Image: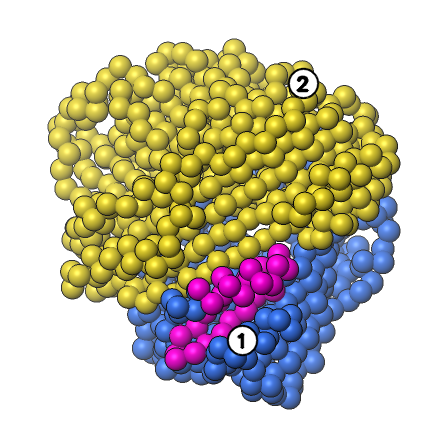
Amino acid sequence: MEKIENLLKDQFEQHEIYEEENEYKSVSFESNKLKEISIKQSKGFAVRAIKDSGLTFSSSSNYDLEKFNSNFLELSEYPTKTNIKFPKKNIQKNNVKIYSEDEFLLENNFFIDKLDRNIKEILKRFPEALCDAEFDLGKGNSFIKNSNGLSLQSKESGISFFISAQTINGNDMLNIYSYASSVKNIDDIFIDKLTKKLIENLSIAQNIKESPKKGCPVIFTPHGLYQTILSPLLVSFNGTNLSKNLSKLCNKENEKIFDKKITIKDNPLIDFSPSSRNFDGEGVSSQINTLIEKGKFISGLFDLKTANEYKCETTGSAVRSIHSNTFPSTSNLIMDGGDSHIDKMIAQIDEGILVDHLLGAGQGNELSGDFSANISLGYKIEKGKLVGRVKNTMISGNSFKALSNVDNISIENENVYGSLQLPFLQTSNVEISS
Amino acid sequence: MQKNYKNIIQESLSKKKADYKEIRIEETVSTRINYNGKTRENVSINSHFGGSARSMSNGGWGFTSFNEIEQAPTKMNESIELANFSKNPSFKIHQNSPKKITLPAEVKKDPRSIKLSEKISLLDHYKDILLKDKKIQGCEVVYGDTERKVVFADSEGNEIEQSFIHVILRIAANSSDGNDLLQSGFSIGSLGDYSIVENLDEKVLESVKKSIDLIKAPKITGQETTVVLDQILAGVFVHEAFGHLSEADNVYENKRLQDILKLGKKFGNSDLNITDGAKIPNLRGSFEFDDEGTPSSITPLIRDGVLVGRLHSKETASKMSEKTTGNARAISYAYPPIVRMTNTIIENGSNTKEEIINDTKDGLYVKNWYGGMTEHEMFTFSSAETYKIENGEIKETLRPVKLSGNLFTTLKNINGIANDLEINQGGGCGKGGQSPLPVSNGSPHIRINNCLVSSG
């Protein structure tokens, strides 16, 4: 890397070198049988350099440094305008636990046996089900060094568990899955709980019910809430869209936009949570960022460049890989719970729907907050009970509108994808069609 | 690529015993130029190099990937050790007569011969056209070209070296009605032909106009209605609604699904014919050999409304005792090949587009695309343009819609196929974490009855 550093020192006012080395292991079952074990290694580097308020970026996993240097010089004739300053040497104040070596020391048979045992649990209740299941492990070492004196190293690891079951009745195909992830090994009790829940959901979903009428009450599971409403909403909190004046939240800080029951924070400082980090992809110390506080828009998420354009401070939200320039993104997204129990929320509904999974979410005009998708897994509520599953039913609406007037938020929350902690939510501002 | 790679590949394949072994070494160089609004956000050249070893033993697979080619023999041994954890019944993998061949990239106008300054100046020009009208609030211009060289060898004796050059361009104009941002644009692509990104002024201006037209366009409420799809959206439809279920890795271990998707079963009306094939030349999904070294083919999937074929990897073809089709593809060396589509098309029917529209009393004309997704028999896909059809005439512009359906009913609900087949190469496909894989989709205009649609 010395060769690159020498070039950068001579030709640019500021520079930054990012390097990472990763190893991934995956043990996967397909259709109830062990399908594949894989071990992937990758390493590479990315360089950003600035002169005359212009930033040049390039990345490579090919260590032909002479070629890299000549490409980089050509690219530097067409830089991206920016006035950012790479962070100075800083004292890292965070000490979040984001690494655990132990999982990589476990034998392959440990994972094979666990997956096999959970699949057999499902087959006991649904002998004809076809299950896929997987453990994915990853560990990595990354380094950031810049010309302003910053030099940081980060060791990170993660493990995730996935299990799905498919049943077929006539032409009806049903697939339900559960997923969990963490920095350290996911304990057996939690995995057993996920599998048990999957079996329960599979049982309820065997019954296909008529879709409820338009205007019926709609409750979102934590997963359904993220997929339907929060995922398009977060597009507007992203510094890239705020800095380009594309977000509906531009310059609306401290305005009340959502129901006062809504508080959402982005918290990268949770021990052993898979999206936690001590510093971001540019070496800026991570911090807890409040996105919505009691219905008021507080802040978006920024890296150095988008913060500079929006004329605010970076929120330490830069993510990167060797394949891409930095961009702002969420870490662990936490939404405050409300004051209703989910059982009571369901019990109060005469006819409604509990939305869990969507097919086709995220394909529309997300900048407007609009969503529209097929409900691939939604449970029919009749007389306060989950009685079956709806099919060929669509849900549409707008995230801003859906969260502007919320009927109920549950006390209970659940972990989704490892890095989201979300409650159940009931809103009437969505449209169901079938 | 290093000169001694052939020796290293041979050394890797001669190591430990396994039922099947393969190795891939790959080098890519990509140029990316992005604009977001008036700012050029990124100009980069990214080069990547790596390899993978895959082996099969006791009916299970081991896979390893690496960046240093010298590691290949060790990594091949490691993959065999991983495969040996399997206790599944063994199976004999499908064999083709082995080939030793080097195939250069198909090139018409080579993007590598165009200076970076020339590419930037052309894209600057498009960006200026997009932002000239004051009603346009922002724009998106994304250009990419990638050179990919892949060397493949396996324990059956194949040694295949192939090169590909892909070009893509996405252009979109954003307007606003004061509340919502509205986007209109297009995506195009080619195999080895830079000229497709040239001379697009009119098309860019059309995006500007369409984006502005959306400002006053109303949304529709969720409903079941008749829809006429243009060639681009019908291409996305065939990919999502049918293509994914024709991939045999959904079926080969699933006896119940095999009964549902039995060859010979009727899925559509007698004028419906669907084909997939990498052997169709000069498209983004075209190649001579797939990532398992199997020769590509043209595979009829539906003939006269009847299911007649499906897409295979070596494993699925072996286990289902069907012919290989050359559809095992990996997005890069870091992933094992899985069954994927290539160039998927609905073939021409006998109607004209005008006959189909004139014959539609009440419905929607849906054009262009945002995206699409499949989960088993259910699928959704979204239009980028929507117009009302009233008494056989195309009327006012509406906001884009999401369309949703079910394989078993929607294919039978196709009741009009025009004779104006066009192929769109601006899309990519995602499956099993491997995205975007270059594919193309094509179709003539088609009409579907009773399709579930909603704005969004």
Q: Which residues are magenta?
A: A45-74
Q: From the image, state whether disc 2 or disc 1 is nearer to you.
A: 1
**Above-or-below relation of A339 to A370:** below
Nearer-the-camera pick, A404 or A11? A11
Q: Which chain is blue?
A: A
Would residue A108 be seen by someone viewing this image from the given angle?
yes
Q: Is residue A58 magenta?
A: yes
Instruction: Inspect the image, locate mark 1, and give the three-letter code of the amino acid beneath it.
Output: Leu
Q: Which residue is mark 1?
A: A8
Return the chain for callout 2.
B
**Residue A416 picture quarter:** bottom right
Image colour for chain B is yellow
Disc 1 is placed on an element classified as helix
Q: Nearer the viewer, residue A423 or B399?
A: B399
Label annotation for residue B97: 2
Amino acid at pointer 2: Ser
Return the x and y of residue B152 as percentages of the image width and height: 65, 35
- Position of residue B54 measured from the top left corner of the image (x, y, whole percent): 73, 38
The crowding category of the residue bearing disc 1, from other C-alpha atoms within 10 Å (few below 14, some 14 to 19, many at least 20), is many
Asked if the stretch drawn in magenta spans residue B152, the answer is no
Give the image location of residue B237, x and y in percent.
39, 32
- Disc number at residue B396? none
Residue at the image position 48 percent from the left and 24 percent from the top: B279
Q: Residue B223 sits in which quadrant?
A: top left
Q: Is residue A161 above or below residue A173?
A: below
